[in-house]
Image: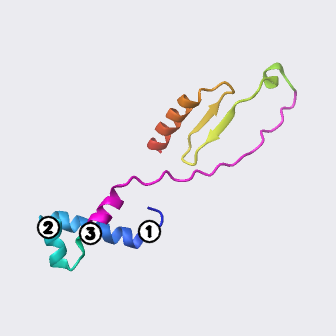
Amino acid sequence: MGRYQVADIEHWRGVLREQAASGQSMAGYCREHGLQEWQLYEWKKRLRRPAPAPFIAVTVSSPEAPAQPSSQNMQTAGIELRHGSGWSLIVEPDFDASHLRRVLSVLEQCS
């Protein structure tokens, strides 16, 4: 739906709300308001589609080097994901990709 202007989307949402509240059929509402019936059906279909997932910017930063190397620091480090809403997640090297997708999906829905 990204190719439509916000004003157009809001206009047609309002028209569809008004039509639903009127109790009239789509055809009757369109006749009364001088609209093409196909337009109302097309916008109803467009507005029902789920919005695409928003783009999430990723900033890559290198961790500060430890002062003294230790056996713990010698292991392969995980990756930390930080979300703009405040949560963070550390992904260890042997992660399960499908599990990570489910976790991220839940976190995004809660954000």
Residue annotated with mark 2: 22
What residue sits 64% from the left and 32% below the top?
90
Q: Nearer the viewer, mark 3 or mark 1?
A: 3
In the displayed structure, 71 sits above or below 43; it is above
Where residue 111 sits: x, y (%)? 47, 45
How far apart marks 3 and 2 lie (CA) works out to 18 Å
Answer with left or right where residue 78 lies relative to residue 26. right
Looking at the picture, tell me which residue is in the foreground, 68 or 89: 89
- The residue under label 3 is 38
Task: Measuring from the top left, give residue 75's x and y in whole percent.
Answer: 78, 23
Q: Which residues are magenta?
A: 39-68
Residue under the image location 23 percent in, 71 percent down: 37
Is mark 3 in CB contact (under 8 Å) with mark 1? no
Q: Where in the figure is residue 45, as x and y percent of width and height?
A: 32, 59
Q: Which amino acid type is marked by label 3?
A: Trp
Contact check, label 2 and label 1, Cβ < 8 Å:
no
Q: Magenta stretch containing residue 90, yes or no?
A: no
Cα–Cα span, label 2 and label 1: 26 Å
